[in-house]
């Protein structure tokens, strides 16, 4: 007897992290119900002939509606960020909840839920950022939140008000070890950056390009090594996020070769931007100010090597959008006086997949299967969402992006449509673009148009990361 489905995606090549096969997908009740040929009938059949049918992207590193300092406002709310993500083929994002000092963490988490509720086009799940690791936070608040599915958190080794000292880092890692959470670490050395920033400012070297001068590779390399050493001492896995250059990668590879569970992430900006982009006319370079800063061609090659050989298991956007022509954004009144005041971060959630597909898969640097692993499957595995998310398998959520692998375009902000007023990737020639994005069986984007119901996205409590849970048990 032939079966009936809500939707059949027919005629495409289904790509997972494991292989690529010609087969159809039967979807029922928001999940993948069958894979094969001649599946039966459906309310809607989507013709995917000549297309690649891939798991929707998971971007496990995005910042949305995060407080960003006096007079500075992030360009995206949950609606606009998830809109851009969906247009770019992403079906789940993991934004951060920034701990507010002196306020119970749970209250802040609830405040972010209130912002996201009903606003998202795609699914979301929160990481936490720990800025005040006191006894109440580490002893009670954090373990309770981990129990409730907030199973990962980020810590910073730099930034006024955010940087943790070595003792605090060790305490956070120890807490994570005990409750089976995964810690993401921003590895740049606070004191070295402050020292460099003050010297540069005294010398009048205040243009946006000196953001990069103030935090050279060795500042990242040293902090990366220190974070690894702390993780080794505590005996806990860590995730080193937004790795930008060969020296830091060497530290991570060294740790991995010694058998340590050091996971690592790199991002779009480290593949296609360089420090030279920060050296634009006037304040143009502010558009590229992010941390760590984009580096050089050798660093780009090292990042590609790391994506290919598995040093990196996830590829994210670190979407952290500020408008350029805006007094609350990159061109705020103080920004001209020093790079120090240029808001730190760039938009990228909408461009991430297309840039990696075009520069990676189409140029023969990585396979389509590696693309899926790096942009979806490994994010789901690492952060406790697998196998519900991150793959196309019977029983998984039908989170699917259908790609036209031959579609060509020159990237503009019109393709991205986040809340910023520019994309740092404008002008890039792209081959390959998602023509349909589906979240739990519902089409949310088709041919560049948002067609899904706003508020379709749901919140996803997560399991513990399998890497971290093993240590805790
Ligand atoms: N780190 C991030 O992860 N995002 C934006 C800024 C930063 O320093
Ligand atoms: Zn960071
Ligand atoms: Zn970030």
Image (cartoon, rainbow, N blue to C red):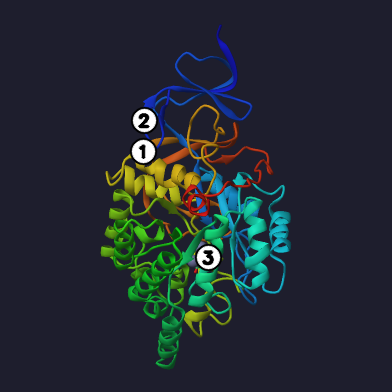
Total numbered circles = 3
Secondary structure beneath label 2: strand
Say which residue label 1 marks.
369
Give 389 or 435, whichever is nearer the viewer.
389
Q: Secondary structure at mark 3?
A: helix
How far, Cα to Cα, is label 1 from label 2? 7 Å
Q: Residue at x 44, y 85 (%)?
A: 197
Q: Nearer the viewer, residue 103 or 226?
A: 226
Q: Picture quarter containing residue 279?
A: bottom left
- The answer to which of marks 1 and 2 sits earlier in the sequence is 2
At mark 1, the secondary structure is helix
* Residue 96 - label: none
Query: For the residue with label 2, is its CB less than 8 Å from the closest atom of ligand 3?
Result: no
* Label 3 neighbour load within 10 Å: few <14, some 14-19, many 20+: many
Residue at the spot 45% in from the left edge and 60% down from the top edge: 238
In x, y percent, where is residue 7?
A: 57, 23
Judge whether 93 appears above or below 36 on screen: below
CA gap between label 3 and label 1 equals 35 Å
Which image quarter is the N terminus in? Answer: top right
Between 57 and 391, the residue placed more toward the observer is 391
Residue 265 shown left or right of residue 307 in the figure: right
In the displayed structure, 64 sits above or below 216; it is above
For label 1, the crowd category at 10 Å Cα-Cα, with few meaning under 14, some 14 to 19 and many 20 or more, is some
Q: Which mark is residue 174?
A: 3
Q: Is residue 359 above or below residue 234?
A: above
**Which residue is nearer to you in this view: 141 or 359?**
141
294 with respect to 324 (left or right): left
| Number of the label disc, if any, that sits on residue 20 | 2
Q: Nearer the viewer, mark 2 or mark 3?
A: 3
Q: Position of residue 335 (x, y in %)?
A: 53, 80
Q: Are marks 3 and 1 in contact (CB under 8 Å)?
A: no
């Amino acid at each position: 007897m032939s079966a009936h489905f809500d939707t059949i995606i027919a005629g495409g090549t289904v790509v997972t992290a494991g292989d690529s096969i010609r087969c159809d997908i039967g979807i029922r009740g928001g999940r993948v119900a069958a894979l094969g040929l001649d599946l039966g009938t459906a309310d809607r059949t989507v013709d995917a002939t000549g297309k690649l049918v891939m798991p929707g992207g998971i971007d496990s590193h995005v910042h949305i509606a995060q407080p960003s300092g006096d007079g500075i406002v992030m360009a995206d709310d949950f609606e606009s960020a998830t809109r851009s993500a969906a247009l770019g083929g992403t079906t789940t994002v993991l934004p951060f909840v920034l701990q507010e000092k002196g306020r119970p963490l749970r209250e802040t988490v609830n405040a972010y839920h209130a912002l996201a509720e009903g606003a998202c086009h795609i699914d979301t799940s929160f990481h936490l950022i720990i800025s005040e690791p006191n006894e109440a936070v580490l002893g009670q608040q954090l373990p309770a939140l981990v129990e409730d599915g907030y199973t990962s958190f980020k810590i910073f080794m730099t930034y006024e008000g955010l940087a943790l000292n070595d003792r605090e880092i060790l305490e956070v890692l120890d807490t994570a070890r005990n409750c089976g959470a995964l810690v993401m670490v921003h590895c740049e050395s606070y004191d070295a950056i402050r020292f460099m920033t003050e010297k540069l400012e005294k010398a009048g070297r205040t243009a946006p390009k000196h953001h990069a001068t103030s935090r050279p590779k060795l500042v990242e390399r040293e902090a990366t090594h220190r974070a690894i050493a702390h993780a080794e001492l505590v005996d806990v896995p860590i995730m080193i996020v937004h790795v930008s250059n060969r020296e830091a990668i060497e530290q991570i590879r060294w740790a991995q070769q010694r058998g340590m569970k050091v996971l690592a992430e790199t991002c779009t900006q480290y593949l296609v931007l360089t420090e030279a982009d920060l050296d634009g006319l006037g304040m143009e370079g502010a558009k590229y100010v992010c941390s760590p800063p984009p580096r050089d061609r050798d660093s780009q090659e090292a990042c590609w090597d790391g994506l290919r050989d598995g040093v990196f298991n996830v590829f994210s956007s670190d979407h952290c959008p500020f408008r350029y022509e805006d007094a609350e954004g990159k061109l705020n009144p103080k920004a001209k006086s020093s790079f120090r005041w240029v808001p730190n971060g760039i938009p990228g959630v909408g461009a991430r997949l297309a840039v990696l597909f075009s520069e990676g898969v189409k140029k023969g640097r990585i396979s389509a299967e590696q693309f899926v692993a790096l942009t979806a499957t490994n994010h789901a595995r690492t952060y406790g969402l697998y196998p519900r998310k991150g793959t196309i398998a019977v029983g998984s959520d039908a989170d699917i992006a259908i790609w036209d692998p031959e579609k060509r375009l020159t990237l503009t902000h019109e393709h991205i449509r986040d809340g910023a007023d520019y994309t740092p990737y404008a002008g890039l020639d792209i081959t390959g673009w998602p023509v349909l994005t589906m979240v739990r069986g519902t089409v949310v984007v088709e041919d560049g148009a948002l067609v899904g119901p706003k508020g379709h996205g749901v919140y996803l409590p997560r399991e513990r990361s399998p890497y971290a849970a093993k240590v805790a048990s």
